[in-house]
Amino acid sequence: MDTDEFDRFVAGLDYPMFVVTVAHHGERSGCLVGFATQSSIDPPRMLVCVSKANHTYRVAQDADLLAVHALADDQHHLAELFGGETDDEVDKFEQCDWAEGPGGTPLLATPRRLVGRVLARHDLGDHVGFLLDPVSVERLDDRGPLTLRMVGDVDPGHPA
Ligand SMILES: Cc1cc2nc3c(=O)[nH]c(=O)nc-3n(C[C@H](O)[C@H](O)[C@H](O)COP(=O)(O)O)c2cc1C
């Protein structure tokens, strides 16, 4: 099947937006991710899918920990920064507030944050699925999610 036909199924679906961050060997990176989901209840597991083209993927390739941030509906600016720019060209972490979390992983001020240990990496096509075993979760407030529909104006910093 070609991508246009597949688009008839996926286009117009709405889902929450996340920022995945990582630090490894003195490098930091992070990108906007829509392809992320809980993948198990017990044991708790998250699956985040990162494009092989992204700077974030290159840093995440050998990293032990990833942080997953659920964006709030008033955090469009973070979607623009992490989805519309690439760490190949700019340092996104110079343009936002963040703090070091476990293993130096950059943590952004978002309502829900999860740091997970990478259990497995799966080749899923043009994306790689990182299966995460949560080591910490934080729920800072109850703002609603920023969703795909709300970030339609953001052009990806990297073609997938
Ligand atoms: C709405 C939207 C959804 C995106 N979803 C994903 C995704 O699920 N996985 C991914 O790897 N990139 C996704 N991207 C693309 C990256 O966030 C974008 O190319 C980013 O600039 C890559 O930054 P990096 O090169 O610094 O890692 C999405 C971008 C947008 C605008």
Image (spheres, helix red, strand yellow):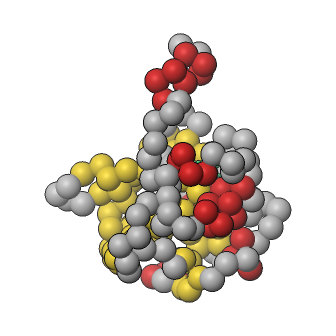
Name the one closer to the observer, 49 or 70: 70
Q: Quadrant of the C terminus?
A: top right
| Image x and y of residue 75, in percent | 57, 67
| Numbered label tally | 0
Q: Kindly identify the residue that appears in the image at 45 percent across and 82 percent down.
A: 102
User: From what the image shows, is residue 62 above or below residue 8?
Assistant: below
In the rendered image, is residue 30 in sight? no
Q: Residue furthest left?
A: 42
Name the one closer to the observer, 1 or 123: 1
Please tell me in which quadrant of the rendered image residue 27 appears.
Answer: bottom right
Q: Residue furthest right?
A: 89
| Image x and y of residue 159, in percent | 72, 42
Name the one closer to the observer, 37 or 141: 141
Q: Kindly identify the residue that appears in the image at 59 percent across and 82 percent down.
A: 98
Q: Kindly identify the residue that appears in the image at 54 percent across and 46 percent down.
A: 149
Q: Residue furthest top?
A: 1
Whether residue 132 sits left or right of residue 149 in the image: it is left
Q: Kindly identify the residue that appears in the image at 66 percent across and 56 percent down.
A: 83
Please tell me in which quadrant of the rendered image residue 77 appears.
Answer: bottom right
| Image x and y of residue 143, in percent | 41, 70
Whether residue 111 sits left or right of residue 100 in the image: it is left
Whether residue 58 sits left or right of residue 11 in the image: it is right
Whether residue 115 sits left or right of residue 7 in the image: it is left
User: From what the image shows, is residue 55 above or below residue 137?
Assistant: above
User: From what the image shows, is residue 44 above or below residue 109?
Assistant: above
In the rendered image, is residue 124 in sight? yes
